[in-house]
Amino acid sequence: MPKFTDDTLLVATHNTGKLEEIASLLGPYGVTVVGAADKGLSVPEETETTFTGNARIKAHAAAKATGLPALSDDSGIMIDALGGAPGVYTADWAETETGRDFVMAMTRAHDMLVSSKEPQPWTARFCCTLVLAWPNGQDEVFEGTIEGWIVWPMRGTNGHGYDPIFQPVGQDVTFGEMDRWEKNRISHRADAFQKFIAGCFG
């Protein structure tokens, strides 16, 4: 696996919180992090059916447009009793005409689980795939997961997305009840980033 030797990394996201988190992570390695908004990049259409496929679309589009190495991620929750759904459609389940409604999405997931008549515990996992792409078309993939199960009713107001219904293995609280820093330490994204750092900067 090639080591990262550039001094600038483009992170293909418009999420300032995510950008700050990655910049902090890469600070010790002397890498300057810039975001998609800094380069005036639009968000490409995600047309793949896997996390890796969609992350590749975003990373390669950004690298090609800027001539910089680009890092992108795609993530979501997979519920075993629903055949891995919502998966890459995790955010889509929350879409409404007035923005994203994750309470609606979580309720949909719960209703489908009840209808499935599958026994509890309803095992699930959060997945995160990072793709680092270079302008020459080369890329590296880093995948992270955290195992758990779906709980109901929703618990906690921290985090975002489906966090209030996901309880990680080994924990007695949901992501929605967990301190942000503790969640960030054990999450699927943390798992993927540890592999990214070890592979490209270790």
Image: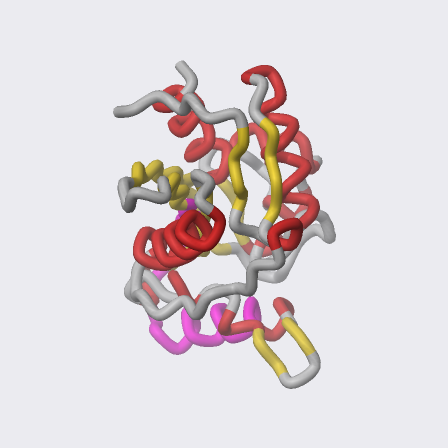
* Residue that extends furthest to the right in the rendered view of this protein: 157
Q: Which residue is drawn at 39% across and 39% down?
A: 132
Q: From the viewer's side, name the closer residue of 77 and 57.
A: 57
* Residue that extends furthest to the bottom in the rendered view of this protein: 97
Rendered image quadrant of residue 49 = bottom left
Q: Residue 68: x, y in percent?
A: 46, 41
Relative to 100, does residue 66 appear above or below in the rendering?
above
Q: Based on the picture, tell me whether residue 34 belongs to the magenta stretch.
A: no
Q: Based on the picture, tell me whether residue 111 belongs to the magenta stretch.
A: yes
Magenta-drawn segment: 105-128
Q: Which colour scheme is used?
A: secondary structure
> Would residue 123 be visible to someone looking at this image?
no
Q: Which residue is drawn at 27% across and 41% down?
A: 138
> Would residue 177 be visible to someone looking at this image?
yes
Q: Quadrant of the C terminus?
A: top left
Q: Residue 106: x, y in percent?
A: 56, 67
Q: Which residue is drawn at 69% across and 44% down?
A: 17
Q: From the viewer's side, name the closer residue of 48 and 116.
A: 48
Q: Residue 171: x, y in percent?
A: 54, 34
Q: Residue at x 35, y 21 (%)?
A: 3
Q: In this view, does 133 lie to the left or right of 90?
A: left
Rendered image quadrant of residue 96 = bottom right
Q: In which quarter of the image is the N terminus?
A: top left
